[in-house]
């Protein structure tokens, strides 16, 4: 068994946060054995300690953040990746703002600071979680699994696929944590975004302080907007960097094999939650039943009829939380006669209508016993990413964000061949079914 480690002396890193842009001075401090890794918000009186533990996870998009009560520390994945990747078990990380420094969008600056501080072995054995049974978590086309491995190491296999962007494409990487050189192979890999994602962030007032030196942005044709890659597979290496940071939230070393396909922070954290439940002996949360609906079932629920029924089959319904459906687009659709002659493209408003219908099915189930259906009220943050043409199979996913007695709110994404064609947030009101249902079901 190996011994726990901390650092020999204090190290400092400074820079603006990725999302809030505020300058943060971060200090790495040695910590006692078995104390684990924790952030200390020194800008609050008295200072608040936030352990790096999956139980303190905060629900955020595009990043991993932690909370203790009402106090949060944002965007911690690169810092934690460096801490775990460099072999540190016990560390106090002081910060004087709510978000860690972004530096150059990688974990390199943090890994370099830890290397300068030096490692101090402690006279206590490292706690280890050995994966003995397979665990698999999925989200759409994304998959993450934890499998038994060989020896006392953690082997990571990552399959990254960005078929929609030729500059990234498909990349795979195998990395053995604790055996391969984290500081050289993983830490320097930087955060990357597609141009549309970067523009959306800036439209929300986020990231205006960033340049091509702090974040990689790929154009639709696959070109890099300024700067250059440190290696052709830098994107997949950064994905492994993020994964290592999220896995550290288990609070102990892991031995086994992690296999990832298109996973991100949400799926990473879900896997750690399952592993944590197994570690503590807690019963895993009950999974909602998955149901399907054929066209007769759909007609029995929705009041829509030809030519305005926009769903052919519901592939999956998970309780009242999530649903996935398909619309098979054919040249026989009546709207193709005028949209457009010689260049048939499915109208974006009809894609949004399909999203609204699936949302109605999903959240209408919540009040099914009251015989209510959903009437479209508002569409927010709608984006059309690519045209939908005859022959395409439109896969629509609806996720419930909020449900009240008379209102519903869903986030929807429509894809063709795995690529996002459209996305939007749909809000609607629930009304009595007898006010909108046709007099018969012919």
Image: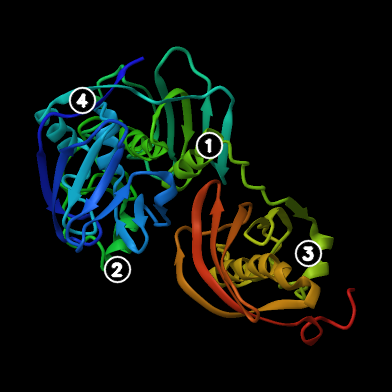
Relative to 296, 60 lies left or right: left
Distance of label 1 from label 4 (alpha carbons): 35 Å
Residue 165 location in percent, x, y? 38, 44
Residue 213 location in percent, x, y? 15, 46
Q: Earlier in the sequence, mark 4 or mark 2?
A: 4
Quarter in which the N terminus is drawn: top left
Residue 383 location in percent, x, y? 44, 66
Q: Earlier in the sequence, mark 2 or mark 3?
A: 2
Query: Disc 2 designates what residue?
Result: 203
Q: Earlier in the sequence, mark 1 or mark 4?
A: 4
**Residue located 61% across and 52% down the image:** 392
Q: Earlier in the sequence, mark 3 or mark 4?
A: 4
**Residue located 24% across and 28% down the image:** 86
Tell me the tag on residue 184: 4
Q: Mark 2 and mark 3 in contact? Answer it, CB < 8 Å.
A: no
Mark 4 element type: helix
Distance of label 4 from label 2 (alpha carbons): 35 Å
Mark 3 element type: helix
Give neighbour class at mark 2: few <14, some 14-19, many 20+ (Cα, 10 Å): few
Of tags 3 and 1, which is closer to the observer? 1
């Amino acid at each position: 068994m190996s011994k726990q480690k901390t650092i020999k002396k204090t190290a400092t890193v400074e820079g603006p946060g990725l999302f809030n842009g505020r300058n943060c001075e971060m200090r790495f401090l040695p910590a006692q054995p078995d104390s684990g890794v924790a952030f200390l918000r020194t800008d609050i009186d008295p200072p608040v300690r936030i352990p790096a533990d999956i139980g303190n996870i905060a629900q955020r998009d595009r990043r991993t953040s932690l909370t203790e009560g009402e106090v949060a520390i944002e965007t911690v994945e690169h810092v934690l990746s460096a801490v775990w990747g460099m072999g540190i078990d016990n560390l106090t990380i002081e910060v004087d703002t709510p978000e860690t420094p972004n530096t150059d969008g990688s974990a390199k600056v943090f890994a370099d600071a830890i290397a300068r501080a030096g490692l101090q072995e402690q006279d206590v054995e490292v706690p280890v979680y050995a994966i003995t049974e397979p665990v698999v978590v999925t989200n759409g086309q994304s998959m993450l699994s934890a499998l038994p491995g060989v020896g006392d190491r953690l082997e990571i296999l990552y399959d990254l696929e960005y078929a929609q962007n030729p500059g990234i494409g498909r990349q795979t990487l195998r990395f053995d944590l604790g055996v391969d050189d984290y500081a050289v192979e993983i830490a320097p890999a930087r955060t990357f975004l597609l141009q549309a994602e970067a523009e959306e962030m800036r439209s929300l007032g986020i990231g205006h302080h960033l340049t091509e030196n702090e974040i990689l942005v790929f154009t639709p044709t696959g070109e890099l907007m300024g700067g250059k890659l440190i290696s052709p597979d830098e994107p997949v290496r950064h994905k492994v960097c993020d994964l290592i940071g999220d896995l550290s939230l288990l609070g102990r070393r892991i031995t086994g094999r992690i296999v990832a396909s298109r996973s991100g922070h949400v799926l990473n954290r879900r896997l750690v939650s399952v592993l944590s439940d197994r570690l503590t002996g807690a019963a895993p949360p009950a999974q909602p039943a998955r149901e399907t609906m054929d066209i007769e079932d759909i007609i029995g629920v929705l009041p829509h009829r030809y030519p305005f029924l926009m769903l052919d089959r519901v592939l999956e319904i998970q309780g009242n939380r999530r649903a996935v459906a398909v619309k098979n687009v054919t040249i026989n659709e009546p709207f193709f006669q005028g949209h457009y002659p010689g260049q048939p493209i499915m109208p974006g408003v009809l894609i949004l209508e399909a999203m609204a219908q699936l949302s109605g099915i999903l959240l209408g189930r919540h009040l099914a016993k009251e015989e209510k259906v959903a009437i479209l009220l508002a569409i927010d943050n709608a984006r059309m990413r690519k045209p939908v043409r005859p022959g395409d199979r439109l896969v629509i996913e609806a996720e419930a964000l909020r449900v009240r007695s008379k209102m519903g709110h869903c986030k929807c994404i429509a894809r063709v061949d795995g690529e996002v064609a459209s996305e939007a947030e749909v809000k609607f009101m629930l009304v009595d079914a007898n006010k909108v249902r046709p007099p018969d079901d012919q």
